[in-house]
Amino acid sequence: MKLSQLLKSIEPIQIYPITVQGTRCRAQDRDQRASKNINEHDVRCAIPYVELPDPDVGSIHYRAQDVQPGGAFVAIEGGRADGHNYIDEALKRGAAVIIAQKDARPPDLTPSDSAARPGRHRQPPTQGGRHRHETAGGGQVNKDVIVIQVADTRKALANVAATFYENPSEDLVLIGITGTNGKTTTAYLIERILQKAGYQVGVIGTINYHYAGKTFDNPITTPESLDLQRILADMRHAGITHVVMEASSHAIDLYRIQRCWMDVGVFTNLSQDHLDFHGTMASYWSSKKRLFTEYLGNGPKKDRALAVINCDNSHGRQLAQLLEMPVIKIGAGNDCELQIVIIRCDLNGIKATISTPHGAFDFTSQLVGEHNVENILCAAGAATAFNIPLDHIKAGVEDLSHIPGRLERIENDAERFVYVDYAHTPDALENVIRALRGIAANRIICVFGCGGDRDKEKRPMMGEIAAKYCDLSIVTSDNPRTEDPLAIIDHILEGTKKVNTFTYSISEIKNGFDFKGFVVEPDRRSAIKLGISVSGPGDTILIAGKGHEPYQVLGNTTVPFDDREEARRALRSVSGQSPTRQSRYGDSA
């Protein structure tokens, strides 16, 4: 794709050529001309200076180590690294275009040497402009490079990515789901419903992204904008018609979903999370609203866009009143278009009736817990937005037996009810434990921790919730990352001790426990084994926090670790044994 085409999607502050030649980098002389030039009318800022080359851009990159010869490198300021510090690496690998929000000229060039637009403010040259001039293969570079300076490279990346991949979301039916909890389950439910209705469906979310029988790892809930546009283009090429996408608050704030034109937006709920990034709940809430006010409410699909809002929480009700677009409200309120009546909700699943504007239907689901009732209702609301027949909605809901790491039951012959869940927020943990508390026959043991380098305020809240609703809390490590695991645990215990101060030592509890209390086992593998070994037949063990994740992050190292596999290993060690069964009140039985 020609550079001039990409430029139409962004608003440059200034554009200037630099020549990388031999051992130095210099601004291109004003009397130099190229045979193929960018016409000043091709770019919004109409820069009246030296005619610039209009190269073919064969690829776009935001990681310098991935740059291909003739590609464009977009320098992004990240949380841990600044792409402007890797412009040298991009040039070394053959970048033909640099898009930056800082001046990328070498410091030995004066402003008069460059071809910046007259009257434009220039940032002082930065150390990021010091360029080495050997290729990755060891040879010397001798070429002209176009530098485009913009106000925000994240926005620019999203815009050029959408243009480069020819706006794939315009050709797809895109459903975006946001909210603190329930996004993944709702996405999988919508996928099954759409499949039952005969559509070809792709899903992009926390667990993975998948389509057309292919599954790919997804390191973050919503991919970076360049990756996201590529995925959508690949789905379009594969014949996918509908895409269900989880939209995280990070993705909304960091413009990852810019130019992703949505047909339907779904709001599940809002509770505390990610304050390490957003700072305040008000900022977090503002981010979630932007999915509807900025992304869903604008673009080529705005006249047909619909919002599906869970109004069984105050934020949902507020959002429904705020939006000017058509809204399908779901919940218990009389003004809700979709409502549900629960007939049964236990360890075997949910039986209920959903009423819609098009009629009512009964269903039975293997999903466990009242929080999944809301997820099912959100999915049914999205299906209603597309006028999908009720029999297809029912079939889709009933077809989904489980979601990886979402109250996923670990089958065993040891007569324990063992569940692995991704609950890593106070609201999610409370929802899951209360769901189990209401249907568990015997005791509940919860193994959990909190992630490092993340929202610290939620740690004591989660400790308090586990202590309140569980018979035994085993406090352990989650993904401590670069924080001290014991410091994280101490923070959790501030909340735990508000409810229960009865502390077991590991040596004491190995023989079982008589009273409600807690124990600390920093090693997660040992904590899971401990939780299962001290349980008795009929007890429920919840392993919370990591869900589907097949790894644990210790320091800056990621090691293989799967809660589900660890639970299975621990269960094999107790199968065939007959440990003393403790009642909920501590009496031997």
Image: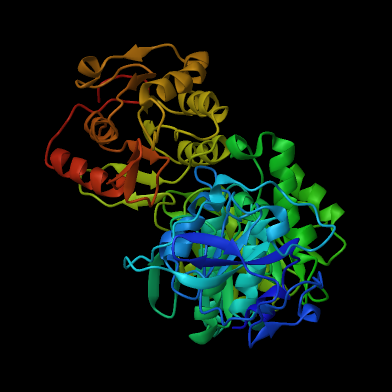
Residue visible at 82% across and 61% down in the picture? 118
Percent coordinates x, y for residue 388 in the rendering: 65, 79
Residue visible at 11% across and 41% down in the picture? 576
* Relative side of 308 to 465, left or right: right
In front: 510, or 356?
510
Residue visible at 35% across and 65% down in the picture? 136
In the displayed orientation, state which residue is furthest to the left: 576
Residue visible at 32% across and 36% down in the picture? 539
In front: 101, or 156?
101
Placement of the C terminus among the 4 image quadrants? top left
In this picture, is 32 found above or below 228?
Answer: below
* Relative side of 144 to 304, left or right: left
- The answer to whether residue 334 is visible is no
- The answer to whether residue 352 is visible is yes
Percent coordinates x, y for residue 272 in the rendering: 62, 37
Percent coordinates x, y for residue 79 in the rendering: 54, 43
Q: Quadrant of residue 45?
A: bottom right
In front: 464, or 75?
75
* Relative side of 181 to 40, left or right: left
Percent coordinates x, y for residue 228 in the rendering: 55, 67
In this picture, is 97 found above or below 127?
Answer: below
